[in-house]
Image (cartoon, grey):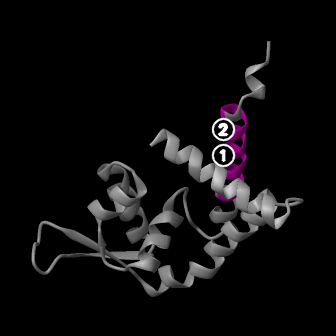
Amino acid sequence: MNSFKDDVSYALIQLIKEHRRQSDEALKQLGLHAAQEFVLFLLWEEDGLSQSQLAARLKLELPTITKSVQRMERIGLVRRHADEQDTRISRVYLTAAGRELFEPAMQVWKNLDARICLNMSELEQALFRRLLQQGLANLS
């Protein structure tokens, strides 16, 4: 009988926990809380998303995004404005300070990727990525 520790799910959870711990530690040095970098990453790609769009793309509840955006607004990383066509919609925009965090936050992710893939060939890295995507697709 195999131990649950031999299961793919267990290994994946342990990887996620360690990734989260290390990313939290590194992002904290930039003044970011967990998952705030995802809001910034999305806004770097498409500034002016609504809070609902952010929640949908990150697969988070709207109150979670609202709290995160409010916290980010207080420290000057984003600003919110009512939509010009529909004032019920709040759009989120990066500030200059938010834009300045792009390179450092992205570097945190690149460093973690490099560490995860250490001692993997390019082929193994591509296969690992594909297998993770397939696993997600299977669960979705």
Label 1 packing within 10 angstroms: few (<14), some (14-19), many (20+): few
Q: Is residue 25 above or below residue 99?
A: above
Q: In this view, does 16 lie above or below 71?
A: above
| Residue at (41, 62) in percent of width and height | 71
Disc number for residue 13: 2
**Distance from Cα at disc 1 to Cα at disc 2:** 5 Å
Locate the C terminus by quadrant. Answer: top left
Label 2's element?
helix
Residue 12 is a magenta residue: yes
2 lies left or right of 131? right
Check disc 1 and give the amino acid type.
Answer: Ile
135 lies left or right of 137? right
To which quarter of the image does residue 117 belong? bottom right
Label 1's element?
helix
- Boundaries of the magenta span: 9-23
Check disc 2 and give the amino acid type.
Answer: Ile
Disc number for residue 16: 1
Residue at the top extreme of this rendering: 1
Q: In this view, does 75 lie above or below 11?
A: below
| Residue at (89, 59) in percent of width and height | 119
